[in-house]
Image: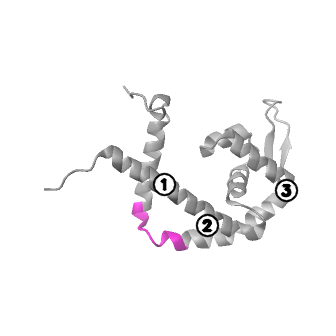
């Protein structure tokens, strides 16, 4: 008779794998972007800003990152001339970040290597499994987005 695993232990194992995978993705991203003078963190910010001007706070929320870590990455991008601040007509205290022409060049310079890496890496897993993983992670993220659950409280 097969003994069923404790769901909490299985979830903990998944969380540990997500953290390890994130580390591997960041290392791969750093390798893929270094020739363009970027890091994975800078590329994440540029990738979001390319859709249009955005505040640090909204970028942090969309990526599930701390505002401080996004601000640090934004400050480095500004110092590098890849991003610039502009006045936010909705909130003068929260400037908008806009990608510069140099930022566009750096972002686009990484695309061929990133695309090739993604296609090659994706071959190691069935696409349906990747889609299932996306759905599971989204469900878990939505579940813990309720403040009570994210602090370990009772969901009821």
Crowding near the residue tagged with mark 3, few <14, some 14–19, many ≥20 C-alpha atoms within 10 Å: some
| Magenta region, main secondary structure | helix
Q: Please indicate whether residue 53 sits to the left or right of residue 58 in the image.
A: right
Contact, mark 2 vs mark 1 (Cβ under 8 Å): no
Q: Can residue 134 be seen in this view?
A: no
Give the answer, above or below, for where 109 lies relative to 136: below
Part of the protein shown in magenta: 120-129
Q: In 3D space, how far apart are the residues under numbered discs 3 and 1 (Cα atoms)?
A: 31 Å
Query: Which residue is denoted by mark 3 in the rendering?
Result: 80
> At x 85% / y 37%, what residue is drawn?
87
> At x 34% / y 44%, what residue is drawn?
8
Give yes or no for residue 146 being in the magenta stretch: no
In the foreground, 38 or 24? 24
The disc placed on residue 18 is: 1
Quarter containing the C terminus: top left
The disc placed on residue 28 is: 2
Give the answer, above or below, for where 89 lies relative to 100: above
In the foreground, 126 or 25? 25
């Amino acid at each position: 008779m097969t003994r069923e695993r404790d769901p909490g232990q299985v979830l903990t194992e998944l969380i540990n794998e997500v953290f390890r995978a994130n580390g591997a993705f960041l290392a791969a991203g750093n390798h893929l972007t270094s020739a363009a003078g970027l890091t994975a963190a800078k590329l994440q910010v540029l990738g979001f800003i390319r859709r249009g001007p955005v505040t640090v706070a909204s970028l942090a929320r969309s990526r599930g990152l701390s505002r401080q870590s996004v601000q640090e990455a934004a400050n480095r991008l500004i110092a590098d001339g890849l991003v610039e601040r502009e006045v936010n007509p909705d909130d003068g205290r929260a400037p908008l970040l806009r990608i510069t022409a140099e930022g566009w060049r750096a972002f686009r310079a990484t695309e061929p290597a990133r695309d090739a890496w993604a296609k090659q890496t994706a071959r190691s897993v069935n696409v349906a499994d990747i889609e299932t993983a996306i759905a599971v992670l989204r469900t878990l993220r939505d579940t813990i987005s309720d403040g009570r659950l994210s602090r370990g409280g009772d969901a009821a």
